[in-house]
Image (cartoon, rainbow, N blue to C red):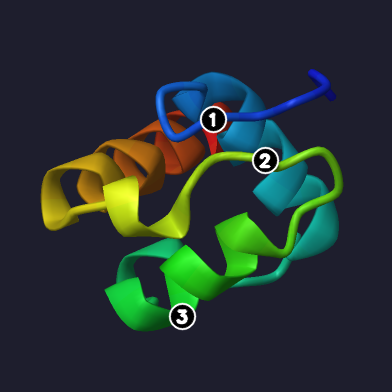
């Protein structure tokens, strides 16, 4: 995983989430939960207030792509 993850690191975030939550139904995750999971990842160091729905959707879709 990349050190000092930021909201724009969707690929690294998706890989880390898939490793941590391998059996999760990605499309059923609430964005509030996804945001919390991302901010709790080892190496995540961005400001939580810089997150928005567009960023979370990008992470979710990247995670889905990584799983395929």
**Residue 45 marker:** 2
Secondary structure under the numbered disc 3 in the rendered image: helix
Where residue 39 sits in the image (x, y, percent)? 61, 59
Frontmost of labels 3 and 2 is: 2
Where residue 36 sits in the image (x, y, percent)? 54, 73
**Mark 3, residues whose alpha carbon is within 10 Å: few (<14), some, or many (≥20)?**
few
Disc 3, disc 2: CB below 8 Å? no
Gap in angstroms between the C-alphas marked 3 and 2: 17 Å
**3 w.r.t. 39: above or below:** above
Where residue 1 sits in the image (x, y, percent)? 84, 24
Disc 3, disc 1: CB below 8 Å? no
Q: Nearer the viewer, residue 23 or 43?
A: 43
* Picture quadrant where residue 64 is located: top left
**51 w.r.t. 13: above or below:** below
Residue located beneath label 3 in the image:
33
Q: Identify the mark nearer the N-term, 3 or 1.
A: 1
Indicate left or right for 53 with 7 as reference: left
Determine the residue positioned at 86% across, 48% down. 42
**Residue 6 marker:** 1
Disc 2, disc 1: CB below 8 Å? yes
**Residue 25 appears in view:** no
Q: Identify the mark nearer the N-term, 2 or 1.
A: 1
Where residue 15 sits in the image (x, y, percent)? 69, 34
* Picture quadrant where residue 66 is located: top right
């Amino acid at each position: 995983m990349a050190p000092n993850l930021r909201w724009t690191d969707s690929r690294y975030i998706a890989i880390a989430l898939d490793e941590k939550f391998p059996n999760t139904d990605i499309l059923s995750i609430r964005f509030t939960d996804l945001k919390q999971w991302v901010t709790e990842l080892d190496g995540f160091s961005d400001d939580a207030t810089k997150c928005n729905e567009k960023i979370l959707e990008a992470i979710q879709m990247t995670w889905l792509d990584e799983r395929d």
